[in-house]
Amino acid sequence: MTTTARQTVRRPLALTLLSASLLAASAPALAKELRLGMITPPQHIWSQSAEQFAEAVAERSDGELTIALFPAGQLGDESAMFSQMETGLLDMGIMTAALTSQREPSMVGWFTPFLFSSVEEAAKATETEAARQMLANLESKGLHAFGYTFAGMRHILMRDTRVEGVDDVARKNMRIIPFAAMNTWWRAMDARPTPISLPDVYQALQNRMLDGVDIDLDALVGSGFYEVAEHLTLTSHMAFPAVSVMSQATRASLSDEQRQIIDEAMEEALAWGIEAQIEAEQRNLATLQEAIDVFILEDAESVFAPANQAFAERFGDHPLIQAFQQQSAELLDAAR
């Protein structure tokens, strides 16, 4: 083959390689999708916070980073979702502090009975050093924690009666979140704590498998449980925070720019969720007052004194829980 012929062959090859490189340079980067799970239904504040987060991430990354949302326990219960984060099947979650306490026991401090009287008070406690330390402790468990958000305060929904004393819940099947703090509190009143998954509660109330539910107003209204249980006793006996987490493996796979986008969007979404929940408390209460019997148990803390004592005896010696209780009380006293 002559030199001229060889050049004729090489020129189209060179042009082809150049064209391919130009096309690659001009093509958008493949989008990276992260999977975020939660147990709450789509209308719940936590799910709405996740939607806000996903929209902000997609917008700020120009679509190069997207968040696929799996609400309502689509990926299983929270124990399953934590396991999925460990194995790489799930990247992120908005998880109850209740189940998160199985990985970081000090999270139980958030469920100290009657430590807070409102979502506003509980939200202030996120500023304490102890609350920040709880989040930091999750790093050693393979999780990066962004921060807290909140559902409403916990109350008691019953099928057949108001709760005016311990006798009204004794020997009753009460749906609880399956974790030690809530189980301890209810057992101290001789109730029968029953850990049924949230999507199954409606039918369990309807079929009388459950007598009542320990629940926040947002989940109560959103899930329609008041259609099959008509007596709500307002107690505000516990706060109910969530913790937003990401697996450390996923976080390590992100660029610095992507981490910054995620961090800023999540901070804003969690803050939005807290404000939205504070507003929702009164709106949900108004909805329920029009639909069912709503009773305020004025002396709830003294009524449930045996349960409060049982909680203190089991969890009160944990140093970080003690610090959290003290710092929260001091912060709230200073704000009053």
Image (spheres, rainbow, N blue to C red):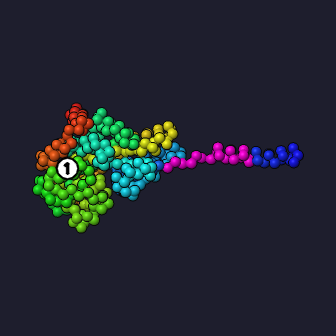
Q: Which quarter of the figure is the C terminus placed in?
A: top left
- Residue at horizontal 29%, vertical 45%? 101
Question: For this rendering, which residue is in front, 248 or 221?
Answer: 248
29 part of magenta stretch: yes
Where residue 157 sits, quadrant-wise, is bottom left
Position of residue 199 measured from the top left corner of the image (x, y, whole percent): 32, 60
The amino acid sitting under disc 1 is Thr
Q: Secondary structure under badge 1?
A: helix
Asked if residue 217 can be seen in this view, the reply is: no
Please report the residue visible at 28 percent of the width from the left and 65 percent of the height from the top.
Answer: 203
Residue 134 sits in quarter: top left
Residue 42 left/right relative to 282 = right
Residue 104, placed above or below residue 327:
below
Q: Which of 130 and 319 lies nearest the eye of the viewer?
A: 319
Majority secondary structure of magenta residues: helix
Residue 113 image position (x, y, % from top left):
20, 45
- The residue that disc 1 covers is 184
Q: Nearer the viewer, residue 62 or 139?
A: 139
Q: Position of residue 311 (x, y in %)?
A: 18, 45
At 22% from the left edge and 33% from the top edge, which residue is drawn?
330
Q: For the magenta stretch, what is the residue range? A: 15-33
Tally of numbered discs: 1
Q: Which residue is found at the position 14% from the left and 44% from the top?
A: 309
**Residue 244 image position (x, y, % from top left):** 37, 45
Verify whether residue 229 appears in magenta. Answer: no
Q: Is residue 73 positioned above or below 49 on the image?
A: below
Query: Taking 299 as reference, is 230 left or right?
Result: right
> In front here: 246 or 49?
246
Is residue 245 something one can see in this rendering?
yes
